[in-house]
């Protein structure tokens, strides 16, 4: 008997164990490694693309909104005797202190694609504070606007508002006749 066999016999008797023998592991073959590395790379690339798309995507208008004009409104203008045309929404003392933006969709008549139209968005408080923002080059296809309420500089108290108006003035249009459409007017938190 050799020493190794004696040690193994004694280990079996006293310790109830055997000497650990090295396990012969099969080495993975090259094609299996390539498939595994390729799968990991494809997964990482897909995760990176999804992450980048999620970060660069513009947020949808899914915020909490207070809709003040849910339907479509058409503003016709014909500047023969008049100098401006407006559509006003009575806000009846509405408290917008917790809101951050005014959102709406707008477009002009499609047959006047070349003629430029500029519209004035005006907010009036019950304290006679009036502020306005001009939107130039209204397109002939629907365009979504989200105007920050902080951009209406002269209104200091948003807790009591009187009206919201969309005004078309004679000096801000190229053609003296036409139409502008406004839809989904809302205030966004």
Image (cartoon, grey):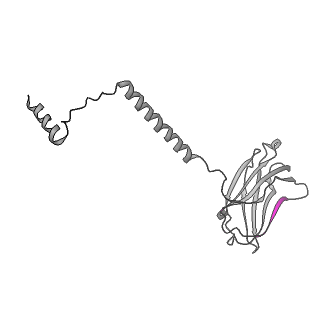
Image position of 82 (left or right of 164)? right
Where in the figure is residue 33, as x and y percent of width and height?
A: 37, 29
Residue in view at x 73 percent, y 59 percent: 186
Nearer the observer, 12 or 113: 12
For the N terminus, give its image quadrant: top left
Marks counted in the figure total 0
Q: Position of residue 37 (x, y in %)?
A: 40, 32
> Left or right: 132 with respect to 175?
left
Q: Nearer the viewer, residue 43 or 161?
A: 43
Residue 89 part of the magenta-drawn span: yes
Question: Residue 177, percent across and down?
Answer: 86, 49
* Image position of 69 with respect to 6: above or below: below
Indicate whether residue 50 is drawn in magenta. Answer: no
- Viewer-proximal residue among 13 and 161: 13
Q: Residue most toward the front?
A: 13
Report the quarter where the C terminus lies.
Answer: bottom right
- Residue 156 position (above or below residue 149): below
Residue 182 in the image, given as x and y percentages of width and height: 79, 53
Residue depicted at 38% across the width and 24% down the height: 31
Bounds of the magenta segment: 79-100
Residue at the far bottom in the pictured view: 127
The answer to which of 116 and 31 lies nearer the viewer is 31
Q: Quadrant of residue 90?
A: bottom right
Q: Residue at x 82, y 46 (%)?
A: 109
At x 56%, y 43%, the residue is: 53
């Amino acid at each position: 008997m050799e020493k190794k066999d004696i040690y193994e016999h004694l280990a079996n008797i006293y310790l109830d164990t055997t000497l650990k023998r090295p396990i012969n592991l099969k080495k993975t073959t090259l094609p299996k490694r390539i498939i595994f590395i390729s799968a990991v790379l494809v997964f990482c690339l897909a995760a990176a693309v999804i992450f980048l798309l999620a970060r660069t995507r513009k947020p949808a208008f899914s915020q909490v909104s207070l809709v003040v004009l849910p339907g479509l409104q058409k503003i016709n203008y014909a500047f023969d005797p008049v100098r401006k045309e407006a559509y006003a929404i009575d806000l009846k003392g509405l408290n917008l202190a917790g809101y951050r933006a005014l959102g709406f969709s707008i477009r002009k008549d499609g047959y006047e694609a070349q003629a430029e139209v500029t519209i004035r968005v005006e907010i009036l408080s019950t304290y006679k504070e009036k502020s306005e923002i001009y939107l130039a080059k209204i397109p002939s296809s629907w365009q979504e606007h989200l105007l920050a309420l902080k951009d209406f500089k002269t209104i200091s108290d948003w807790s009591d508002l009187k009206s919201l108006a969309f005004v078309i003035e004679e000096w801000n249009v190229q053609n003296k006749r036409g139409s502008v459409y406004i839809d989904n007017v809302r205030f966004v938190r």
